[in-house]
Amino acid sequence: MSYQALYRVWRPQRFDELVGQQVVTQTLKNAIITHQISHAYLFAGPRGTGKTSAAKIFAKAVNCHHLEDGEPCNKCDLCKAITNGQLNDVIEIDAASNNGVEEIRDIRDKAKYAPTQADYKVYIIDEVHMLSTGAFNALLKTLEEPPANVIFILATTEPHKIPLTIISRVQRFDFRRISAKDAFGRMKYILDQKNVEYEEKALWVIANAAEGGMRDALSILDQVLSFSDNQVKLADALTVTGSVTKQLLEKYFFEVTGHQSAEALDTMKDILGEGKDGQRFIEDLISFIRDVLLYQESPELIMVESTGLTDEDFAKMSKAAPATALYQMIDELNNIQEEMRFTTHPDVYLEVLTVKLSQVDGQANVQPAPQANETTSTVDQNTQQTIEQLQATVKSLQATVKKLQSAPAASTRPAKQPSQPRVQQRKVEVKLSQINPVLGKATRRDLVEIQGLWQELLSKLSVPQRSLLHVSKPVAASEDGVIVAFDYAFLFQQAMDDSELLASMEQGLQELTGNERHVVFVPKDKWPQIRREYIKEHGLDKHQPQQSPRPASQQPVQSATSESEQPPLPPEPGEPVGEPPTSAESGPTDTVSKAQELFGSEIVKVEDN
């Protein structure tokens, strides 16, 4: 096949031929001239901006022995071999199809060998972001400690997909989009070299349609040349790119800004009838309105010749609508463009868009300013009323100040209000319906058992639950229930609201004792009163033995599990409450025996005074 595409024939062979990348090319040339060549580079940027071309030019420049101001000579055998892709020391790899670990390991192993013909062995890995994670890891060690005379050039359109460990070991160069002006100049140069007739307006249409890619611009130019029999005409460029003529856009713009929706719909149908793409129509219209908006601000901001219109046309359009209307039109176009991405009926959206644009007026919701006389009279009336109100307020405040100054100092001091707690706590509610059944069956033996297992029970709970129960202890127990008292009311309330805590404790008690026990919480400060009321209501206090007063040293010691001021727990079911003491039972030994009988010998401590 003898014919080659324009972007292949006119591929840059020198740094000076790269379009729109002056910063990158100057930096690379200076690095070559000063012999400050790095072992790895990353070329990142949009498609068709010259990344791979710059990599090949760099490979020729570092190996060329006849450099001319940092540029390769393109005449020696090495330069020609690299240009033709015939030099074994310059290896170009497509990472999209060679993205496995084995391929990168092969590169790593072969990189250890010295170059055969050139001074440097150069690896150009295109679309490097397609490598797998394992392949990146295999490449990482080589980039960290590269062999001598080996250079890696990584090219990608998506640098955000490359691991930071790779990016930190390379010199990064960002290739920017090529402006329409630069693309226009390059295409004009190529057509002049080929002696092809062209219309400059057609080249501007192609440059704008390329969207920053030089390769795309040359591909479109190739299509236009084929379509128009080796000529570049405006009509052919519009047909190939699907763009809308500036005259139709101008007509459409005047109709929507003049609120002529019917005429604008007819124009829009004519545009679609010519086979124009709906998305391209919206993009062209946004660019068109943007040019009008910039021309309103400053005519120097745009290149009129690149738009295909004249200064007179822009002067008329800038007067057709205010800037606020243009802002609203661009917002509507952006919204419709986003919605049209997923539809198969773009004509419906374009019809709705046309009606909306025809209704845009750009007027802000501002009330009309009143006339001068009306404004003056209204301001005078409002000012007078305000002054009168302020004067009355000042007189009232002055009278209050005089009254306070004449009053005695003591009377001016406000009465001290009772201090209120900073945090209002909820009312503590105790569930007596759950406490009383436990007290009715409570025994000292069950309480001692629970107390012995208390620490082991806490170990089965979570850390937050253990911290909550750290200031609590069991105060009564039966075969099917346990009463736990909390030192602080707010912690008691928090525990009452924690159903998960209750479930965890009951499950732990069942595992430790083998019995299902219901857990009830009470505040510590209310526990003595609850016990006294229960004992009184059930007549348990009448059965307590009456003892004669005796010195404190001879009183039996209370249970270690109850507070000193609390009455004793009810006796176990079936246990004798005890009769009033007789004369023979009034001695200390009988008292100790009775205490051991009531409370258990293991918790009664006898001290001799």
Image (cartoon, helix red, strand yellow):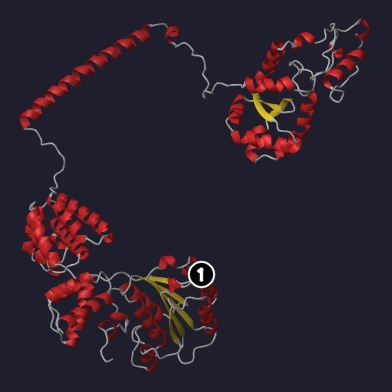
**Residue 295 place in picture, x, y as percent:** 14, 59
Percent across and percent down for residue 501 are 63, 35
Residue in the picture at 26% in, 16% down: 394
Q: Is residue 207 or residue 429 the one in the foreground?
A: 429
Taking the view exactly as shown, the residue that stands out farthest to the right is: 584
The residue that mark 1 highlights is 133
Q: Quadrant of residue 42?
A: bottom left
**Which residue is depicted at the point 15% across and 84% down?**
229
Count residues near mark 1 (Cα–Cα under 10 Å), then give few for <14, some for 14-19, many for 20+: some
The answer to whether residue 314 shows anywhere in this view is no
Q: Is residue 270 left or right of residue 529?
A: left
Asked if residue 405 lies left or right of residue 460, the reply is: left
Q: The N terminus lies in which quarter of the figure? A: bottom left
Extreme-bottom residue of the structure: 77
Image position, residue 544 (x, y; %): 80, 11
* Residue 472, x across and y down, in percent: 68, 29
Relative placement, left or right, of 40 versus 50 is right
Foreground residue, 608 or 103? 103
